[in-house]
Image (cartoon, helix red, strand yellow):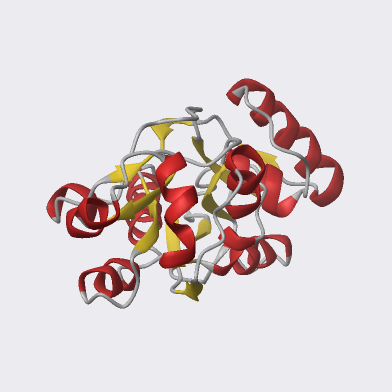
Amino acid sequence: MRRWWRVSVVFVVVTLVAACGPRGGTPVTIRVGSKDFTEEFILAEMYALLLEDAGFKVERKFNLGGTPVAHEALVKGEIDLYPEYTSTGLLTVLKQPPVADPKAVLEAVRKGYKEQFKLEWLQPAQFNDTQALATTREVAERYGIKTFSDLAMKAPELRLGGPAEFAEREDGIKGLQRAYGGFQFKEFRQLGTGSLRYEALKAGQVDVVVAFSTDGQISGLGTPESSRPPGPG
């Protein structure tokens, strides 16, 4: 499907306290967390390895769950940092409206997190991930789906699978409906953010899945995908 909204999603780390480095020969322990999907595991492990290489002791607390769970662990002091997306912070955590400019998004989350949670966003990594909708070539050809407009019209005949928050986020179904109309799927199945989405797609249990543009399954399975819904995140 064609791209219809393109905005950088900056990958960042949120931390409760500034790392002070090893003191007096005793390594400082930093608890690194992650959400519950592959991209988070990989990047959290990269951060952990870099911290260990710098002399810190690292406690890994990966696979915590979705955004609310990881964020709550950070606020409660159960972890010291985890990888987060700027627009997820803006929309899901701060409950603010979508912003198209990535720099403005970063400024907003830095300000909001500091004021509400006394948390700091570190320097963004040069990393971009966008939400997408993906289907099989068979489904795309059967229903004549090439664009979001096509999918909006065919949605009543199709089953969508993905994380529960996609149905409520402003850059999810709600934003698609405002921009295109339609997008009233026959069924929405909660499948989380892991590989279960693609397994269900391959097995024919759903017809369309919420995807991330960095998902290896998109190219590995030859799955057509469309870029993200309206708004950053």
As drawn, is 41 to the left or to the right of 183? left
Of the pair 23 and 5, the residue shown nearer to us: 5
Quadrant position of the N terminus in the picture: top left
Identify the residue at horizontal 33%, vertical 48% (top origin): 46
Q: Position of residue 72 (x, y in %)?
A: 69, 66
Residue 20 image-quadrant placement: top right
x%, y% of residue 207? 33, 66
Q: Can I make out residue 130 in this image?
A: no
Q: Position of residue 193 (x, y in %)?
A: 42, 65
Pick the residue in front: 146 or 133.
146
Q: As drawn, which residue projects farthest toward the right?
A: 115
Name the one closer to the observer, 154 or 43: 154
Q: Quadrant of residue 62?
A: bottom left
Side (left or right) of 213 relative to 16: left
Query: Does residue 231 appear anywhere in the picture?
Result: yes
Vertical placement of residue 115 versus 222, above or below: above
Q: Residue at x 43, y 73 (%)?
A: 191
Q: Can you say whether 115 is above or below 108 in the image? A: below
The x, y position of residue 3, in whole percent, is 39, 31
| Quarter of the image that includes the C terminus | top right
Q: Is residue 145 left or right of residue 191?
A: left
Residue toward you, 33 or 188: 188
Q: Which residue corresponds to the image point at 76% horizontal and 39% vertical from the top-left?
A: 97
Could you tell me which residue is drawn at 38 percent across and 54 percent down? 211
Q: How many marks?
A: 0
